[in-house]
Image (spheres, rainbow, N blue to C red):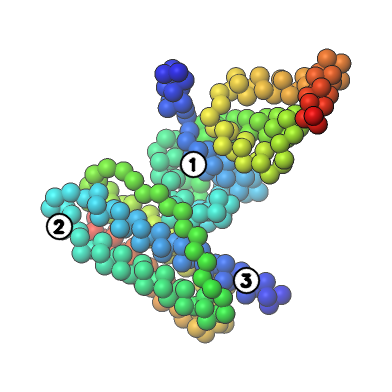
Amino acid sequence: MKLIKHAEIVDELNRLMAEEMEAFLRYFQLRYRLRGTERLAAGTFFETAMQETLEHAEAIARHIRILGETPHVNVNVEAGGGPLALKDALNEALVFEQQALEAYRDMLPRVVGDPGLEDFIRKQIATETEHVQEITMLLE
Amino acid sequence: MTETWKEFEANEVTHSVAHHLVAIYEVGREYGGWARVSDIARWLGITRGSVSINLRNIKARGLVAEDDRRQVKLSEQGLKIAQAIMAKKAAVKTFLRDVINVPEEQAEIDSCKVEHLISHSTGENLLRFIKFLTSDDPAARQALSQFRKSEEN
């Protein structure tokens, strides 16, 4: 029984890591769809977001290692499209940030009682909530 | 040839959209048609982020509806398309597996590749052909038998 739970948690962590890696790739590509002053204005925002998503993926990978497993990367993303207005880019970012937040929220009940993981997931929920709020505010 | 290509381009759904519609149908079966993004993602083996991004286009085309908890359900049109795709896939798979002896796994893969590309009438004709070939009609039995013998040679 314990083994099944362990495998399921690792599986979920791998999925969360994939969410973060995909978000990194989407932010990476979204920057190049912005044009002119919008690109200039939002460049730092997207670069910070890229940095953070990579840090999150790295933190998740470390937790997988702590559980005695090796991270399994399964990323299948296709990001295309032409020039995009900043507002539309932020709307797209909001979609995947909301999903990341919900993924962490769904994960929380499964790790309650595991001090390291529970603390980590709670922190991630706080961070992702901030991201969602920040983007929502920018879109107002 | 040009006309065929135009028809391909004008097709109602892409491979990705087809998979999403079928996933929503399958996942939602136990919940009155409603499916959560997380379950769709799991069914498709992709991330929630990708599902959400893809759903934006599908929603904009009126193929799915969304509730205030961000669960999605096929619209009438979406349901029709999903059912048509599944029917065509079943017909192609049956033909590949039961008529021309393609192994189950390969039949699944190949039927998946063409399920959304063939027209409704082709799907219907294919089904009629399979029904005929697998019927008790002596001509059909003989044709199938001859084909199987030719495989052995």
Q: Do the residues indicated by labels 2 and 3 lie within the same chain of the protein?
A: yes
Of all residues, the one furthest to the front in this rendering is: B153
Q: Residue at the location (30% across, 54% down)? A: A29
Q: Do the residues indicated by labels 2 and 1 lie within the same chain of the protein?
A: no
B151 sits to left or right of A27: right
Residue B125 occupies which quadrant of the picture? top right
Chain ID for label 2? A
Task: Point out residue A54 in the picture as x, y percentages from the top left corner.
Answer: 36, 68
Task: Point out residue B103 in the picture as x, y percentages from the top left corner.
Answer: 72, 40
Number of on-image labels: 3
Q: Residue at the location (24% across, 52% down)? A: A32
| Distance CA(mark 2)–CA(mark 1) | 34 Å
- Tag 1 residue: B16
Q: Secondary structure at mark 2?
A: helix
Q: In the rendered image of this protein, does residue A131 appear above or below residue B40?
A: below
- Tag 3 residue: A7
Of all residues, the one furthest to the bottom in this rendering is: A115
- Tag 2 residue: A40
